[in-house]
Amino acid sequence: MKLKYGDKRALNGINISVSKSEFVALVGDSGGGKSSLVNLLIRFFDPSSGKITINGTDIRDFSLQSLRDSIAIVTQRVYIFRESVAANVAYGKEIDEQKVIDALKKANAYEFISELPEGIHTRLDEFGANLSGGQRQRIAIARAIYINPKILIFDEATSALDSKSELKITQAMENLVKDKITFVIAHRLSTVQKADKIVVLKHGKVSAIGTDEELHISSSEYLKLKGLQA
């Protein structure tokens, strides 16, 4: 699979297979192609050659709405509205209180939400000013869980957080992989050590694929990335 921006190839010769319940990490230097790969999956762009398939069907054969209804993305930028916690989790959909609570629990967020004055009915400040960065991020994860997507994407979701908040969110990620495909674009490699597959991207190509343990043995590029964070 290839993707070109003008005369420049952003991705070249990408060939990755992912199964249900797999936790896949995309790592590499800035500009390596991590975000471009995710943008192809949600069809912000289409490949200039090759294709992406789900259960053998080219994603271009699905309607955009049905494709995107099956995918949820959590980024480091979280939008919190001046509404209740429940409304922020449901995010425009009908509020099912038990479903909200279940999503918050899976996102490691229910403990702090239950301590708020009115629990899930507590009204949040605009932009989540009355929450910490880690708390906002966990509400964003609960929001993604609420729609029950088949594919979850975490795009640098922990890069701006302290280590304690990062651990909570990493644990939440690990709670979710059982029945979904989960992609994580990782800034901190500590968040992806338990990934089923770590895909190392460099200059738009796959440099290596393996577990953390396997890449320690086989990939100098992966060791270089980890060494920069030591």
Image (cartoon, rainbow, N blue to C red):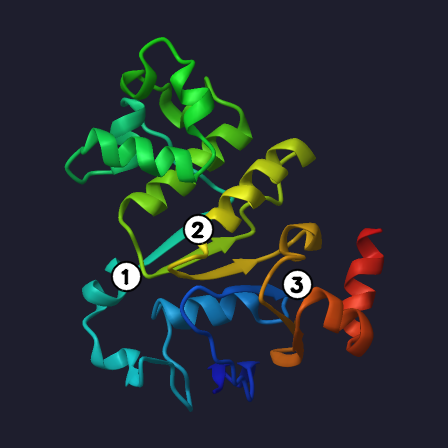
- Pinpoint residue 220: horizontal percent, then vertical percent: 82, 74
Question: Tag 3, which secondary structure?
Answer: loop
Disc 2 designates what residue? 176
Return the disc, 1 or 3, that comes first in the chain's sequence.
3
Left or right of 112? Residue 61 is: left
Q: Amino acid at mark 2?
A: Leu
Q: Quadrant of residue 110?
A: top left
Disc 3 designates what residue? 30
Q: Nearer the viewer, residue 36 or 163?
A: 163
**Does any portion of residue 152 appear in the rendered image?**
yes
Viewer-nearest of discs 3 and 2: 2
Q: Amino acid at mark 1?
A: Ser
Q: Quadrant of residue 201?
A: bottom right
Question: Which numbered disc covers residue 70?
Answer: 1
Density class for disc 2 (Cα within 10 Å; few <14, some 14-19, many ≥20) is some
Residue 160 to residue 4: above or below? above
Q: CA distance from mark 2 to mark 1?
A: 15 Å
In the orientation shown, which residue stands out farthest toward the top?
A: 117
Q: Nearer the viewer, residue 19 or 85?
A: 19
Number of callouts in the render? Answer: 3
Q: Nearer the viewer, residue 8 or 47?
A: 47
Residue 127 to residue 54: above or below? above
